[in-house]
Every structure is written in structure tokens, then in C-alpha cells.
Amino acid sequence: MQPLFVPAALLRCISLATIFLSLALSFTALVEAASKSPLMDRDFPDPSILQDTDGMWYAFATASGNKNIQVARAPAPAGPWQYIDQDMLPSTGSWTTGRNTWAPDVRLIAPGRYVMYYSGELGNNSALHCIGTATSSSVLGPYTPSSTPFACPVSQGGAIDPAGFYDSSTGRRYVVYKVDGNSIGHGGDCNNGIEPTVPTPVLLQEVSPSDGVTLLTDSAPVTILDRTAAADGPLVEAPDLLRAPDGTYVLFYSNHCWNSPAYSVNYATANSVTGPYTKSVRPLIGTGDGFNVTAPGGATSVSGAGSMVFHANCLQGRCLFHAQFSMNGVTVRVS
Ligand SMILES: *[C@@H]1O[C@H](CO)[C@@H](O)[C@H](O)[C@H]1NC(C)=O
Ligand SMILES: *[C@@H]1O[C@H](CO)[C@@H](O)[C@H](O)[C@H]1NC(C)=O
């Protein structure tokens, strides 16, 4: 065997390469530590989350398969999540087609009174959606829908993506939702990429704190957010409101089109529930960040605590994910 002769220059190359490789490996390890996997191997879009009085956690999701509204249960927001093979909303209300029921959000309003806010497809009009409410005396239903929609701005494109919010600092209760302007847009990205573009505002509607559905006298909905083409593309949607312990109101929302990798979870903050809300500069969760997820959106936070569920693309469609978040002033960080 010939003795191996390695020139000094090559040795330096090898040691540089080794350093580079170990740096690359430790970087990969960091990314791997933060990357997220679906919590259930099934299509479970637009999740909301609620802790019931027995301590268990329930997540509700958009129609899939033969169910109008899906549900799953877990001992903690991070899981393990177990799918429950029951339709939470077998009847979606006489004002709906019964198809394409989206983005449920269930809140416990008072002992034995659960209200589900959801997006139903209008039975009388070309595939527009409006907000419906349904009530139940137990978390797993059956939920009985109201015979009329809760909010239905047909001339502005209808409404979708409701979420309840209880402000413990004032004892007032609200519903936030998106006016579905892009449903009457003029084509392109999510039907709102071509001029003239249409507003897709997020509205805040105060409701009775005792039943969660009755509009208070003289309480008109207030616009608290809208799209700008540069920051949000065709739309903002999927609002979810939270009051942080320091009194900051945090409005989570999704922007861009749900079927594009630009879809992301964002947030805006305000000192008052009615705003003005200031948008964060960068998405909170986006495609290709450390979570290694694609088209994340539809986030709902656990009220009063630093945890959220959201969906992102997966083999089955859009799967359930979970993240922790922390706040430092008006800055939110996820992990
Ligand atoms: C990122 O996600 C893809 C597809 O889901 C997966 O194949 C890959 O292993 C993930 N990478 C990391 C670092 O987790
Ligand atoms: C369709 O139904 C909704 C909700 O009941 C109502 O607000 C709207 O005016 C109706 N539209 C037409 C064209 O009848």
C-alpha cells in the first residue's frame, strides 16, 4: 500500500468542510426541533378550540367527508387528538343549502349553553355564505341551528369565519367575522386579484353576554381590519380575538389565498377592542419557516393562554397543527 499523501492545502479544505458540515448539521437540528407534524392524519380545516368543564379539549372543524362540522377531543391542546366520528351539525339551518359548511367556532357562554358560530351556504343565492349560530346543552351536541342567519351582508359578498370573544376585563361578549367580499370579486387570486378589487373587512359585533347571539340594541358591527393589496393580497380572513394579560388585544388572522403557499397566520394588536389594530410586519406562521408547514392559516387561540391550533397542508388536505405562543409587549412569538 502506498502511504497516503495529503497536501496541506487539501487538509485545510477538509477541516473547513468539516466545520461547515457540522454547522449545517446543527442548523438542521434546530430546524428539525421546531418543525411541526399534523396532529391527526385527516382533513380538518379551520380548527377552533374549547376546553369543556370536564377539563378535556375539543376542536371543531370545517365540513369534510360526510360531516358538516367535525370534532376531535384531546387531554391538552397539543394532543394527542382523537377524532370523534359524529357530525356536530347534522342540520345546518333552513336558510342554508346544507353544503359547504365552514369554519365553526364553539364557545361556552354559560353553564349548559354552548354556542356554535359557523359559515353556512345560502339556500337562496349563488353560493354566498352567511354566519349562522347553533346551540346545545352539551359540548358534543347535537347543535340546533337558528332558522335565520346571525349576520348576512349579501350585497357585500356575505360573511364567513366567525369567532366568539369574551372580554373578561369588561364582561362584554363579541363575535368577529369576515365580510366575504372576494366571493363577489372579479377573478384572479382567490377571485380578488383583478381590479376593481373588493374589501374583505373583519367586523366586530357585540352580542348579549348572557346568550352569545342576541345583538345589543344600537350595536352596529365595527370594522377592525381590512386588506391592503401589498400586505395581504386578495383578502384577510379567519379572525380570532384575544386579550393578553397586559390588556393588549391581539387579533389573529389569515391573509393571501388559502390555496396558495402565501397563505399565512398573522396578527394585529390594539389597546382597545374596537381598535385601531396595527398589523405585524411579518407573518407569525408562514410557508417555509422553521415549522416546515405549507399554507398555514385558520388559527384559533386558547382563550387566556399562550396556545393555538391552526391548519396547514397535508396529504389528506388541511390537517390540524398546534403551536405555543408568547407575548412581549405587542410582539407575538410562536414555538
Ligand atoms: C418537512 O416536511 C416534509 C413534508 O411534510 C417532510 O417530508 C420533511 O421531512 C420535513 N422536514 C423536516 C426537517 O421536518
Ligand atoms: C337570501 O337569504 C338571506 C338570509 O336569509 C337574506 O339576507 C337575503 O336577502 C336573501 N336573498 C335573496 C335574494 O332572497
Image: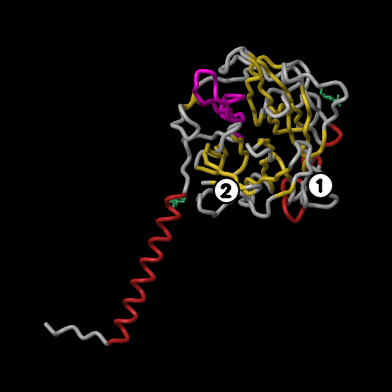
Instruction: Pick the residue in front: 334 or 93.
Output: 334
143 within the magenta span: no
* Occupied quadrant, residue 60: top right
Residue 96 lies, with reference to residue 203, above or below; the image says: above
Confirm whether residue 251 shows in the render: no
Q: In the displayed structure, does residue 120 sit left or right of residue 221?
A: left
Q: Nearer the viewer, residue 327 or 296?
A: 327
User: Which x, y percent locates residue 239?
Assistant: 69, 37
Residue 284, x across and y down, in percent = 61, 49
The numbered dot on residue 216 is none
Give amino acid for label 2: Arg
Mark 2 vs mark 1: in front: 2
What's drawn in magenta, residue-wise? 46-72
| Residue lying at 81% horizontally and 38% vertically, measured from the top left | 223
Asked whether mark 1 lies closer than 8 Å to ligand 2, one says no
Image position, residue 298 (x, y; %): 63, 39
N-term-proximal mark, 2 vs 1: 1
Identify the element where label 2 is drawn. Answer: strand
**Which percent across, then down, holds residue 75?**
45, 27
Q: Is mark 1 on a helix, strand or loop?
A: loop
User: Is disc 2 in contact with disc 1, using a CB cutoff of under 8 Å?
Assistant: no
- Mark 1 crowd level (few <14, some 14–19, many ≥20, 10 Å Cα): some
The number of callouts visible is: 2
Is 228 on the left-hand or right-hand side of 72? Answer: right
Rendered residue at 83%/45% (across/down): 198
Residue indicated by mark 1: 186
Q: In which quarter of the image is the N terminus?
A: bottom left
Q: Which mark is residue 333?
A: 2
Amino acid at circle 1? His
Q: Does the magenta stretch include residue 57?
A: yes
Find the distance from the CA under tag 2 to the CA under tag 1: 36 Å
List the single residue furthest toward the left. 1
